[in-house]
Amino acid sequence: MTVLHIINKSPYERNSLDTCLRLARPDSAILLIEDGVYAVRAGSSASATLQQALEKHPVYALQPDLQARGVPTESLIDGIKVVDYDGFVELTTEYEKTQSWL
Amino acid sequence: MKFSIMVNEGPYTHQASDSAYHFTAAALKAGHEIVRVFFYHDGVNNGTRLSIPPQDDRNVCTRWSELGQQHELELILCVAAAQRRGLLDEDEAKRAGKNSDNIAPGFEISGLGQLIDAGIQADRLVVFGD
Amino acid sequence: MASKKFLYVNRKAPHGSIYALESLEVVLIGAAFEQEVTLAFIDDGVYQLLKNQDSSAIGSKNFSPTYRALGDYDVNQIYVERESLELRGLTKEDLMPLTWEDEDDDWAEKDSIHVVSSAELAEVIEQQDVLLNF
């Protein structure tokens, strides 16, 4: 069954992103919410990790959380898709279950 | 589609309750059914009616209450987690000899079995926490 | 009622916060529901299974012996990620022995703990219906 992996922590504070990538199968997707969205900025040290992730998984970031944190959409690594809460709900219907990396 | 939501953090300290709220509202708007919102760990603190946030801020607890009443949602506080943290309904307060209850309208206190049942009933369980 | 496969994903250390204890409480209640129950211990979650825990000097509930009762609740599929152990300088020998008695095999005592690679654990996650994240 396909999995939507949800990451809500900054990669600079917690290892959720690394652990997720270690355990995510190729048919799964990754959604960054809350402080998880800090990973998306191009040129950051987390961006190399995300670049590799993008080769295997679709990666999404939650727009209201980007906006709240002053992370401009233009600063995003190429290939990351931005969704709002409606898109978040839709993703959870497209994948068969969710794994929140708390 | 049927959704169950689990909220593992209280209001204000973490964003988890806000995220869960916005997700739940968006799911309802899209026509999905919410089987149950289950509050666990410090998440039970979302069910207090005694929270008084500053006027220029959102009222996290009242917002859940209102959404719950508007859509007839099951907002369940885990009894074990709630008792630990001093969240009581009228019956619990009476039974424990406390002089007040503090649970907000629309919330109910029930057992952990409701969480497992929420997982069984729903097509998707989405967990929000720290 | 249709049976579903539940996986409890434990990633937090015990004692510093309540998540491990309250997760275990869900597992014990959930065991009565006749669903298929599997536990995964990843990252700091592996510390929950360490031997020789004694919280008496910090005054908190000493719940680590409860893990040893899981077998009696028919909770005997316990997966520990090898990478998480190795990163922490641990091996299976550092964990409490968790066992169950197989009634289909003349009540033979069997090991509940499976130390598995990330790839194997990913496979286990894949097979589940419901993931409870702690």
Image: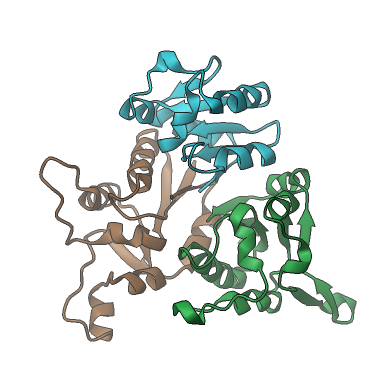
Which x, y percent locates residue C72?
69, 79
The residue closer to the viewer here, C45 or A80, is C45
The residue closer to the viewer here, B86 or C85, is C85
Which x, y percent locates residue B28?
36, 39
Q: Residue at x 56, y 43 (%)?
A: A15
Q: Residue at x 55, y 61 (%)?
A: C13
Relative side of B67 to C36, left or right: left
The residue closer to the viewer here, C11 or C124, is C11
Q: Is residue B61 above or below residue C19?
A: above
Q: Which chain is green?
A: C
Q: Is residue C58 above or below residue A85?
A: below
Q: Is residue B91 above or below residue C124?
A: below
Relative side of B28 to C85, left or right: left
Which x, y percent locates residue A102?
50, 48
The colour one sees for chain A in the rendered image is: cyan
Q: Residue at x 33, y 55 (%)?
A: B10
Image quadrant holding the N terminus of chain C, namely bottom right
Q: Which chain is brown?
A: B
Which x, y percent locates residue C128?
67, 50
**Residue A1 visible in this rendered orientation of the protein:** no
Q: How many marks?
A: 0
Coloured how?
by chain
**Residue A78 visible in this rendered orientation of the protein:** yes
